Image (cartoon, rainbow, N blue to C red):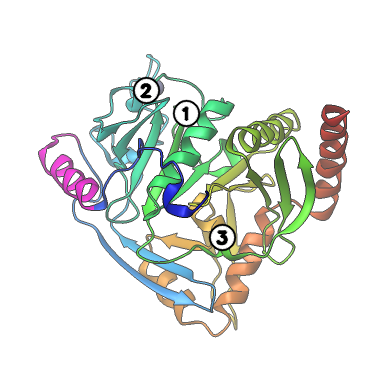
Amino acid sequence: MKNASAAVKRPAKYAIPKQELLDRWDEMRSERDITYKPKSISTWERSIGDADVRVIYCAGRRKRQESNNTDGNKDEKKGEENEPRPCSLCFAPILRTMPGNLNIMPNQFPYEYGAILGISKTCKKQDDINTGDLREILEIAYENPYLAFFYNGLGAAGASQEHFHIQGVLRNGRIPPIEQAPLVPFLNNIEAANVYKTPDYPIYTLVVDGEVFAASRKAVGIIDLLKEMDISFNMAFTPDKKICIIPRSKAVSSTLKMVSGDKDYAQKIGGMEVMGWFCTEYRTVFDKISKADTALEILTNALNDVGLDQQQQYALEEKLFRMFAARAA
Ligand SMILES: [Zn+2]
C-alpha cells in the first residue's frame, strides 16, 4: 500500500539547520582576522508590488578591493603586480563540508545577514558546470528551503570570483518573483525533464525540471550551448528542484531610468536581481526607487535591458530545438 508515511524518506544529507548555519556564520565572522565586509550588516528592504519584488539597501557593502591590500582603491584584479593572484576561495574558511562536490562558506562580502557561498572543492572555472554539480545544488536547495540559491556567470552575469561558486541568501519567508512566474511548456517530455519559458517574467528565462539527473543533464546541455554561443547567464535554484537559466545580453549593469528630470542610476544586475531582489549599497538609490510610484516599471525595464532580445531568443531556441531533437532521435 502506498501512502505518504510509507514513502521511503532518504536521510537529509545536505540539510544545515538554520540556527546552526547562523550561529556558525556569526562565529566565523567574529573569529577571523581576515577582513569581512561589512563588519556589521545593516540592511533595509521594501517590498514592491504583489510578487515580492524587493529593494534592499546594504549599508557599507564594498567590493574586495577594500580588503587587506594596502593599495585599497585600485581595481580588484590588482594585487601583487607581477604574480598571478592566488585564488581566495581555495583557502576560504569552510562552514560546512557537503557530501559531494561542494563546500559551504560564509559570503565574505554579504548583501545580507546569513549570506553564504557554495564553492567547488576543487578549483575550477565558474562556467565549468557538470551534471553532478547541478544535482548536488538541487539537493542543497531542496533540503535548505530557508535559503534562495543563485549563480552568477562570468562576464555580463556579474561573477567576480573565478572559482566555481553559487550564492545563497535567507528568504525570510519570501519567495523570489522568478519562482512565481507562470511557466509555459517549451521543450517537454524529452529525457524525463521539461523545459519551460516564462513569457510573463521581465527577463527571458528557461526553467528546467523533472527527474533530478535528467533535469541536470538537460540544463548542462543548455549551458554548453550558451557557452558555445558566448552568452553569459545567471541561474536560480528553487526548493522544488527547478533550475532557472537566465541568459544575458552583454550588459552587466542596467540603468534605472528615473522620472521627471531625476538622474538615472546604474544598477549592477546579478543573480539576485534577476530573481527580482534588487540590492544596492547606495542609500539614495534605495530611497528613490523604493518610494517611486513607478518602481515596478523601473525595475522591470532594468531587467528587460539585460536579457536576450527577441532575435537572440529565436537564435537560441532554434539551436535548442535542433539539439534536443537530435538527442531524442
Ligand atoms: Zn580556487
Amino acid under label 1?
Glu
- Asked where in the image residue 254 lies, by quadrant, the reply is bottom right
Mark-to-mark CA distance, 2 and 3: 33 Å
- Considering only order in the chain, which callout, 3 or 1, is on the residue closer to the N terminus? 1
Amino acid under label 2?
Cys
Compared across the picture, whether 127 is left or right of 281 comes to right
Span highlighted in magenta in the image? 19-34
Label number found at residue 199: none
Q: Is residue 322 magenta?
A: no
Mark-to-mark CA distance, 1 and 2: 8 Å
Disc 1 vs disc 3: which is toward the camera?
3
- Residue at numbered disc 2: 87
- Residue at numbered disc 3: 179
In-front residue for pair 218/276: 218
Q: Cβ(mark 1) to ligand 1 < 8 Å?
A: yes
Q: Whereabouts is ligand 1, in terms of quadrant?
A: top left
| Structural crowding at the residue carrying mark 3, measured as other residues with C-alpha within 10 Å and reported as few (<14), some (14–19) or many (≥20) | many
In-front residue for pair 167/88: 167
Residue 138 position, x and y percent, is: 50, 41
Q: Cβ(mark 2) to ligand 1 < 8 Å?
A: yes
Compared with 253, 100 (above or below) is above
Residue 271 position, x and y percent, is: 52, 50
> Could you tell me if the residues under marks 1 and 2 are in contact, i.e. CB atoms within 8 Å?
yes
- Considering only order in the chain, which callout, 3 or 2, is on the residue closer to the N terminus? 2
Q: Residue furthest front?
A: 1
Label number found at residue 162: 1
Disc 2 vs disc 3: which is toward the camera?
3
